[in-house]
Each structure stands twice: as structure tokens, then as C-alpha cells.
Image: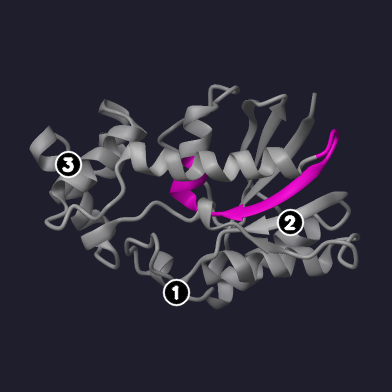
Amino acid sequence: MTKYQLYLVRHGKTWFNRYNKMQGWSDTPLAPDGVTVAKQAAQALKDTDFAAAFSSDARRAIDTCKIIVDANKNHDKIKPVKLPEFREEFYGYFEGHNASETWFIVGKPHGVETYGEVISKYSMDDSKDFLKAADPFHDAENAEEYWERLDKGFDKLDQIAKDGDKILLVSHGTTIRSIMDKYNAGNFDITEGPRNSSLTILEVDNGERKVTTYNKLLK
């Protein structure tokens, strides 16, 4: 049996984060304060005995991962690897749109007007399905498509991990929140999104996954 810990860190704040825009497969660089919080996370995790380090293939995650690995005590032993399976949710037509306006459009047919209301009244998976339905091109990922992708990523990690490993994975806000929602072992609040460069820990024990730490501020 293999038991390991996945240290999920959200990337630092980007320009689209600053402007409250939908940022899934689209990508903007880390803003100056995003670099600052990434460096704070790196200092908080510098003595963590990481056996491996991964990020999504988005530049914002790659850059955050490099900042953390460069400061880690094992920096000369580990090399960050890209795992596209842990990209952010794809928002299709709504990529780059104002987030509040997007969720008003998506939620209104269902009697809600904000993202928080969508996931509170319905669910995280419903938010994905509603978004795809509202996308005039239907390119956005629905829940089935999204989890098929992430499950492939988890399979890869399960094959790589050795018993007792601590593995770094830099990913994204909605993805980390979706993982927390699905594997919530701590009664965490679904309406609370992970902050930039915050830590979420997923405990994996012979394929069973439990989130035991969520949205811990690293400083």
C-alpha cells in the first residue's frame, strides 16, 4: 500500500486575478504582489522534504512552482514537472470575461446571481454543467469532462508516489476548491475559495483521498 501527502498550492496572484476576470486555460503572468506571496509560500515550505514537484502547464503555476522549489532544501534533487491534467477548469467562451458578470449570466436561469450562490444552492459540479450550458459554443468543460481529466492526473501521481512521500503540486483556485469539495474530510466551507499561494493538503492512502488541510495561509 502507498500512503503519501499531496501539498496543493494555489499559484500567486495574476493580473487577471487582480481584474476579477475568468482565468481557466487562458493565462496571465504573476503580478508583483503575486510574486511576493509565492516567495512567502516558498519560505514557509523551504524545509518540507519534498520528493517531487509538479505544476499545471499554465505559466502562472509553473512560475510559482519554480519559486517554491528554488527555495526548498531539496532543490538540487527535484525538478518541477508539468502535469496538464491539473490545469484550471476550462471556461470556454467566458475565458477573460468579468467573473461577476459571467456568473450572473450563468446563474440567473437557475435562480441565483453569483458563483457563491451557485455552489451553495446547487454544487461545484453543477456550476461546471451550468457554465457549459450557458456557453454559446459549449466549449466549457462540464463536470464529467473535468473529472475525467483530473482523474488521469491522480492516476499518474499514484503511479509515481512512494510510501511516505510529500509531493508538491501547484494548481489553481477552482481546481483546488473542487478537489476539496470532492474529498472533504474536515468539514471545510465550500463558499471559501483558496487564497493565492495558500496550502491545501490531500492525504492519499492506497488510492483513498482525503483533504485534511484547506486554504492555509503560508507566510
**Which quadrant of the view contains residue 18?**
bottom left
**Which quadrant of the view contains residue 74?**
bottom right
Q: Amino acid at mark 3?
A: Gly
Q: Amino acid at mark 1?
A: Thr
Nearer the camera: disc 3 or disc 2: 2
- Report which residue position mark 1 lands on: 28
- Please give the range of residues in magenta: 162-177
- Residue at left offset 17%, top offset 53%: 135
- Report which residue position mark 2 lands on: 53
- Residue at left offset 38%, top offset 62%: 23
Q: Could you give the CA–CA distance between mark 1 and mark 3, rounded to whole angstroms?
A: 26 Å
Quick check: is 167 in the magenta stretch?
A: yes
**Which quadrant of the view contains residue 120?**
top left
Residue 155, given in percent of the width and then of the height, sits at 61, 39
SS for dot 3: helix
In this figure, what is the number of numbered marks? Answer: 3
Q: Could you give the CA–CA distance between mark 3 and mark 2, rounded to whole angstroms?
A: 37 Å
- Report which residue position mark 3 lands on: 107
Which callout, 3 or 2, points at the residue further toward the start of the chain?
2
Q: Residues within 10 Å of mark 2 (few under 14, many from 20)?
A: many
Please tell me the numbered disc located at residue 96: none
Q: Could you give the CA–CA distance between mark 2 and mark 1, rounded to whole angstroms?
A: 22 Å
The answer to whether one can see residue 76 in this image is yes
Nearer the camera: disc 2 or disc 1: 2
